[in-house]
Amino acid sequence: MNLAIHTTNLSKHYGSLVALAPLNLDVYQGEILGYLGPNGAGKTTTIRALLGLIKPTAGRAEIFGIDSQTDKVKAHQHLAYVPGEATFWPSLTGAETLHLLGQLHGQIDLKYRKQLIKRFKFDPSKKVRTYSKGNRQKINIIAAFSTRAELLVMDEPTTGLDPIMEQAFKESALEAKNNGQTVFLSSHVLEEVEALCDRIGILRSGKLVELGTLAQMRHLSAVSVEATFDGQPPAINHLEGVSNVKITGHILNCQIRGSIEPLLREIIEAHPKTLLSHEPSLEELFLSLYGDEDIRNQATDNER
Amino acid sequence: MNDSLATTVVKAQKKYHSPQTVIGRFVARRTFRSASVWALIFGIYVAAKAIGYVKAYPTVLARQKLAATFSNNIGIKIILGPVHNAATIAGYVTWNTLAVMVIIGSIWAYLLATKMFRGEEEAGRSELLLAGQTTPRRAAVNIMAGLTASLAVFYVIMAVAFTLVGKYHDVNISVASALFFALVVISGVFVFLMVGALASQLMPTRSRAAAVATAIFGISYVLKAIGDVTSAHWALYITPLGWVEKVQPLTNNQPLWLLPIFGLALVLSGLTVYYAGKRDLGASIFADRDTAKPHTRLLNSTIGLALRLTRTTTISWLAAIGVMSIIYGSLTKSVAQAFEQSTNAKNILNKLSHQGHLPGVLAFLGVVFLLQMTVMMCYAASSSSAIRRDEAEGYLDNLLVQPVSRWRWISGRIGLIVGVIILGGIIAGAAAWLGALGQNDGVSFGTYIQAGVNVIPPVLFILGVGIFTFGIKPRLTSFLTYGLIAWSFMIDMLSSGINLNHWIVDTSILNHMAFAPAASPNWSVNLIMIGIALVLSAIGIIGFLKRDLAAE
């Protein structure tokens, strides 16, 4: 399969601060890759290095085999970018801004752009300074999708959008995928990533700590179990892989990593009234990977 | 809330005294530095004029002769106002510095006010502040209080400087007079600070607010000039600049004229507060059209975009240079006569031009083109700052994530600015010639154009410094370019009045320039200046191509 993005030991340091540790990442053509991490984990640094807006301290990045540092213009012909914050020239109208961005990119599907304007309920006749944050973000989204670029690099693209527009965004992203386009999606909206992405990469303190499909990640994580009994729930703390055991009256909650069989045996012997188990959601996975303590530590580091 | 958390919250609250005034303190913190710099420049300016005067005119006879020369000169009156007691040091200092300081200070003040009011609102930062323990009206009062606090710093530094100048032997200006003189300067500046504040409530964008404030300032100046040179003296009574003139500090103190000045400032500040509460955040009293038909003719390239976004500013700069040149050109003959008769003027001009006796016409035109050179240097500084602003505010990201190389963007921007600079030089020459047409001043069209072209190299030099700084230390772009201009202008002014060490004098760019048309342009120096500009620009461009984009 062709690679849309290929990075080799791509890293960025700001003095002693490691914003991005050597990153080796492949994004395949036609997939949607979710890129997750808390604030300051290095998501935007990765994207800015990919786009050539900042110079990596070491390593290289390729967009469809083109070095994105040494041959930026050629690399950018294959991509469109949606930043998390829309900063446009306040005196231009929405239509003028879309025209300008299309002209600069060099390729534009005008018919599709009209469709997108309608889908996102965007009024292009207004001046940029009069738009709300969400409407300004629509300019970025419409401009990027209407290029039909082979690679869409998106950094928290739904910032400021209402739920209906988020839905419109999802629809457009899936259309792009069906069209064979690749999407590199950095997002904080875990539900959005869960719904859209083929694979997910998770960053932690500038390091890529997980990369795989959601199913693959779920196998690595704990399964939540809840059982209700007529009497006292059984003692299960001694079982291997069991954690977070919580007994509230007749209800037992716990998590199990690895084989679930010994736990099931203990529960069945105690004659449960109900038994529920579910795989971890992306949110649970995300939180289990970071934990409150880590997030706090990272926030403190960023403040320094 | 548990006890320990409650204690933490109480402790944290104790740290923040009077949150209602935080906006004012924040504004004061952001503006006092530029107020201090201008106050220092004004102090040095007054020192140069006062000390230069006592040295050049040591006797009463020489001073009376000077007074007679200038008292009825229309051109001088338009620029500086009428002379009162020019035979005294106090009269000379007032006449020679008051109008200049009030004009420069007022422009600084209204631009600062529009930046702090409408500029902050445009950037979306006001929203954050208004979400605090305040209301739009209280916030407006706070911003004005912060600006006024900076103006107070301005006053104190200026007052100390004037007092020190007054202590210089032979100058002999009392402490009370020095303090009063500083108060008169600050009163004019204060009115236009409030003009800027009110314009920011009325107009939807910072540039329009600044344009309205500039128009009001321009009308005030024209009315003052009409009052000074025609029999329509009533015009002086309807303009704050006329009231400032009427105070006549140091000579014939009329402190009652300060009442309408501060009264007007108070009314303007009251209106500012009133309208701040009346309108929505981001809206304005004179609403702009929110929608427009798309005009995409220029929006096909980065150069086209730059042209579209800067066209109003560019046309305004070129028009200002043209109009100024026509006005100065039309005054050539009359001011030249005064120059011919003034020993001090001759001394100053000789020092500026590094030449012996100059004919009055050429000497005056030399001063005119020196002023135009400074104005155009400011254009170069403002353009390099605009390039930096595009990067700092994130506009550049929109372009560089497209198939647009950094080289294409920066070379287009620089090319455009260089084009305007060349055009500005030619306009300065041609417009001055047009203004002087019919006066038989004996200066050919070619000489005027040559003098205009002579303005270009130092302006390109400033642009080179701007591009160099932008490429290497982008956050210092404005500070270094404007700082270099202020320094050069200050050293040139000082060296024309007092003897400075030649190493210091050589640090001024203006000092290296031929005083054209009084002296023939020195093409070797011009070429060296352009060469240095090219090298600086090249280093700056390479630096920009290699560095990370840097936000504000």
Image (cartoon, coloured by chain):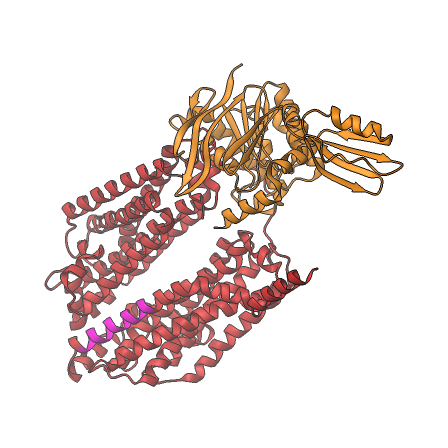
Chain colours: A orange, B red
Residue B212 in picture, x, y percent from top left: 49, 59
Q: Is residue B479 above or below residue A185?
A: below
Residue furthest to the top: A1
Q: Where's the N terminus of chain A, which quadrant?
A: top right
Residue B388 in picture, x, y percent from top left: 40, 46
Residue B184 in picture, x, y percent from top left: 39, 77
Q: Residue at x 60, y 39 (%)?
A: A290
Residue furthest to the left: B356
Q: Is residue B347 above or below residue B325?
A: below
Q: Nearer the viewer, residue B26 or B468?
A: B26
Residue B547, quarter of picture = top left
Q: Residue at x 53, y 53 (%)?
A: B205
Q: Is residue A31 magenta?
A: no
Q: Which residues are magenta?
A: B40-54
Residue furthest to the right: A230
Q: How many marks?
A: 0
Is residue B110 in view from this perspective?
Answer: no
Q: Nearer the viewer, residue B17 or B272?
A: B17
Q: Nearer the viewer, residue B168 or B272?
A: B168
Q: Residue at x 42, y 43 (%)?
A: B550
Residue B188, quarter of picture = bottom left
Residue A7 in picture, x, y percent from top left: 46, 25
Q: Nearer the viewer, residue B517 or B133?
A: B133
Q: A251 left or right of B284?
A: right
Q: Main secondary structure of the magenta part?
A: helix
Q: Is residue B121 above or below residue A219?
A: below
Is residue B379 in view from this perspective?
Answer: yes
Q: Is residue B51 magenta?
A: yes
Q: Is residue B542 above or below residue B373?
A: above
